[in-house]
Amino acid sequence: MTAVDTRGCFLSLEGVEGVGKTTNLKYIVEYLSEHGITVVQTREPGGTLSGERIRDLLLDPTVDLLDDTELLLMFASRAELVKKTIQPALARGDWVVSDRFTDASFAYQGGGRQLGFQRVAALESWVLGTFKPDTTLFLDLPVQQGLDRLSERPGKDRIELESTAFFDRVRVAYHQRIAEQPERFRIIDASLPLSDVQQSIKAVLDEVIRQHPLTTRHAN
């Protein structure tokens, strides 16, 4: 039995607060695994020992950070994640599924914090070059509906405590990013019942599986 020696596939999952990323990330990982694909699951910020420590700082509601500091810390964590986790996994032929990636910086820091896309793009070029997910699933939901869902959770983090206007800017920035790179994004209507949302996700995953060599499947 021999494996096909090609690069794995990198999927990211994006969305504003309350869209159901955690539940649907679990669904994605399980669906791919059922298809014989070895999956590495990770998240941003975080995914490495150093990245998780950065995450703790970024999300601590008692910490007051400058907007530029927040953006730089996001990319510091991302640099660690890409070099230590994502690229090695892809080189092995594994698939990687990440809860957020660089698009989140364009949306949250570029849009929400109003730092603009140009500053984020400069860091993206420096830290990542042209590296980006093969496919990004964007769970889309009206901001207020997401915040209503979020209100049911205890203990909000530093980002979740932001205003409705902040998250409105985040969602607009995501759609701007999608308009700039439509070939990479798949929009999922997260306002639908969960079963319908996951049917839409399944359709996207089936498409990606058909188009990408299954590097972790073995042939006799």
Image (cartoon, rainbow, N blue to C red):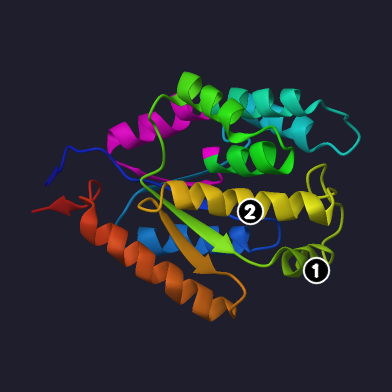
The correct choice, above or below, for 30 with respect to 162 in the image is below
> Residue type at mark 1?
Asp
* Residue found at x 37% / y 59%: 32
Q: Which residues are magenta?
A: 81-102
Could you classify mark 1 by the number of other residues whose Cα lies within 10 Å: few (under 14), some (14-19), or many (20 or more)?
few
- x 64%, y 34%: residue: 116
Give the answer, above or below, for where 74 lies relative to 185.
above
Q: Which of 190/119 is in front? A: 119
Q: Is residue 150 magenta?
A: no
Cα distance in 3D space between marks 1 and 2: 19 Å
Q: Earlier in the sequence, mark 1 or mark 2?
A: 1
Question: What's the mark number on residue 148?
Answer: 1
- Seen at 57% across and 29% down, the residue is 118
Residue beneath disc 2:
172
214 or 219, nearer to the observer: 214
Q: Secondary structure at mark 1?
A: helix
